[in-house]
Amino acid sequence: MTKSAKSILLLGATGTIGRATANALVAAGYTVVAPVRLGSDATDMGIAVPCELTQTDLFSIMTEHACDAVISCVASRSGAPTEARAIDRDLNSAALSAAKSAGVQQYVLLSAICVQRPKLAFQQAKLAFESELQAAPITWSIVRPTAFFKSLSGQADRLRAGKPFLLFGNGKLTACKPISNNDLARYLVQCLTDTALQNRILPIGGPGPAITPRAQGKMLFQAFGKPPRFKHVPVGLMSAIVGGLSMLGKVSSRMRDKAELARIGRYYATESMLVWDEAAGRYDADATPEFGTETLADHYKRLATEDIADDRGAHAVF
């Protein structure tokens, strides 16, 4: 293909989506240049360049390898305010400044659909950089995916142990169109060449229809060959936990971070990962674009039959 000689600087290459994106880039004929933190396991990341990830380092790497574009898959793991500002905002900002200085023409950003209704520190950090990117003299794409398969798989071990599936409220408060790592990676790579995806904010989900947590639970039980069993957790309980941790956070930075994690959990328990219709004041499944072929049901079947690691990290709620 004509793009086969192009080099793409991939930020966040060692993460779950980053690795899938590296594979998608290689499959599409690109050269992957992956700046990684010192000591990171990046043996399969194309041209891996250990560095401090400063603006100076990134500029040198982009220049040395004649990078044509940046794809950024970096994201804070915990969502804590300090980490979110350092990763979601500042690291991306440093990469954008380096890209402009190096003459890089394009920047593809992996963001999140939840920034539509920002209530959390990491959402504000993402939005701050989104605004900076849109104002830059560079071709940009801001990709806002819905839920990831891994974020909807945290209760698999509970089911294996014979425990019920936990639901907040009636289990129908929210819905999403989850997208797989591979499908999202292919979409990010497509932004490099599809002009219809450039200089645009792009909400994207996997193949529909939208799925509620209750439907997810039934799907997971079916994959394990077990009859559905549910336990309902009042949303008010999460609010009480947030309130208690917030009080403790006034005297402890550790508790402040725990309070923010609890807020994140409450947010995802009460907000759908779909396009928000501001005029109608509701989430709109029909307006949420779909891409790819892999379904959550397929992923759950793999969970039930294969050894798939739970890599949700600090975002784990269950």
Image: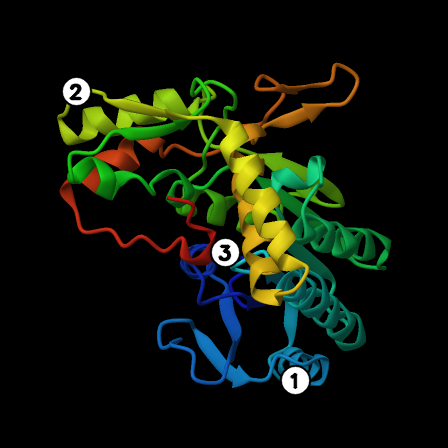
- Residue 139 vertical placement versus 254 (above, below): above
- First-in-chain label (3 vs 2): 3
Residue under the point 37% across and 21% down: 214
Question: Are the two marked residues, 3 and 2, in contact with CB atoms closer than 8 angstroms?
Answer: no
Q: Which residue is nearer to you in this view: 298 or 157?
A: 157
The amino acid beneath tag 2 is Pro
Q: Residues within 10 Å of mark 3 (few under 14, many from 20)?
A: few
Q: Does residue 79 appear anywhere in the picture?
A: yes
Residue wearing tag 3: 1
- Residue 97 vertical placement versus 225 (above, below): below
- Which of labels 1 and 2 is toward the front? 2
Residue under the point 40% across and 59% down: 23
User: Judging from the image, what secondary structure is the residue with disc 1 in?
Assistant: helix
- First-in-chain label (3 vs 1): 3
The picture places residue 64, in percent across and down from the top left corner, at 63, 85
- Which of labels 3 and 2 is toward the front? 2
Q: Does residue 263 appear anywhere in the picture?
A: no
Q: Which mark is residue 146?
A: none
Residue under the point 66% across and 79% down: 58
Of all residues, the one furthest to the top in this rendering is 280
Mark 3 and mark 2: Cα distance apart in space: 50 Å
- Which of labels 3 and 1 is toward the front? 1
User: Judging from the image, what secondary structure is the residue with disc 2 in?
Assistant: loop
Q: Which mark is residue 57?
A: 1
Q: Which mark is residue 227?
A: 2
